[in-house]
Image (cartoon, helix red, strand yellow):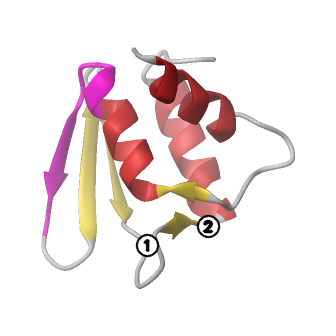
Amino acid sequence: MNKTHRTTLAAIFANPVRADIKWADIEALVRGLGGEVHQRAGSRVMLVLNGVRANFHSPHPRPDTDKGAVKSVRQFLSNAGVMP
């Protein structure tokens, strides 16, 4: 995991929940941790990490992830055994 991935991970677990995290950075973090990102129909994305799967909607038209999605990503990472 490189410095950019560590920065993204810290942002995901920051309090209060941030709404300025780029979805592309979250995908890069999952890949950097050895996970997989599968594009599905429309804006659906499935993330797989350490045997844990989660489905999300990538944000559009803006690249920033909203607070609700950040909380869901935080839970996904926690379930996969990833903490900052």
Residue 12's place in the image compared with 70, above or below, is above
Check disc 2 and report its element: helix, strand or loop.
loop
Residue 49 in view, yes or no: no
Q: Quadrant of residue 83?
A: top right
67 lies above or below 52: below
Residue 36 is a magenta residue: yes
Tell me which residue sits at (47%, 37%) in the image.
76
| Along the line of sight, the residue nearer the viewer: 51 or 73 | 73
Q: Residue at x 25, y 23 (%)?
A: 51
Helix, strand or loop status at disc 1: loop
Query: Viewed as shown, does residue 48 lie left or right of 70?
Result: left
Q: Is residue 42 above or below residue 32?
A: below
- Label for residue 59? 1
Across and down, in percent, residue 7 comes to 59, 29
At x 48%, y 15%, the residue is 81
Pointer 2 local density, CA inside 10 Å: few below 14, some 14–19, many at least 20: some
The residue wearing badge 2 is 66
The residue under the point 63% across, 17% down is: 84
Q: In the drawing, what numbered circle is on residue 15?
A: none
**Residue 46 to residue 36: above or below:** below
Q: Are marks 1 and 2 in contact (CB under 8 Å)?
A: yes
From the viewer's perspective, is 50 left or right of 62?
left
Q: To which quarter of the image does residue 30 belong?
A: top left
Measured as percent of width and height from the top left, residue 28 is found at 33, 38
Q: Is residue 19 magenta?
A: no
* Magenta stretch bounds: 31-40
Residue at the limit of the structure toward the front, as seen here: 3
